[in-house]
Image: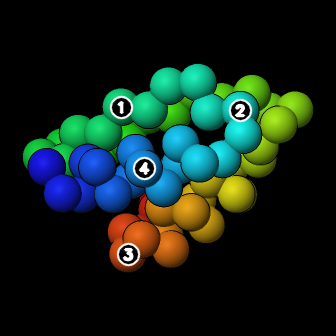
Amino acid sequence: MHCRNAIRNSVKKLPGITRTEVDPPGKKVEIEFEADQVTAQQIRERIEAVGYRVV
């Protein structure tokens, strides 16, 4: 639960995030976003800033 909340809370602060699904057992995150408001790189950096690796 902690990792799910950490990731959700970190990315929801970015503009343009419309949906975030986190599946810790599957080690998978799905994020929908408005590309004119935020980049995939910004999302990656935010997730890595809370201690998770993005592959």
Sequence-wise first label, 2 or 3: 2
Mark identifier at residue 16 = 2
Q: Residue at x 75, y 27 (%)?
A: 34
Which residue position is annotated with label 4? 9
Helix, strand or loop at mark 4: helix
Which residue position is annotated with label 1? 21
Q: Which amino acid does label 3 sit on?
A: Gly
Which residue position is annotated with label 3? 51
| Front one among 36 and 9 | 9
Q: Can residue 27 be seen in this view?
A: no
- Of circles 2 and 1, the one toward us is 2
Helix, strand or loop at mark 3: loop
Q: What residue type is labelled 2?
A: Gly
- Of circles 1 and 4, the one toward us is 4
Q: In this view, does 12 lie to the left or right of 27?
A: right
Q: Which residue is drawn at 33% across and 57% down?
A: 6
Cα–Cα span, label 2 and label 4:
14 Å
Q: Can residue 39 be seen in this view?
A: yes
Q: In this view, does 50 lie to the left or right of 45?
A: left
Q: What residue type is labelled 4?
A: Asn
Cα–Cα span, label 2 and label 1:
15 Å
Sequence-wise first label, 2 or 1: 2
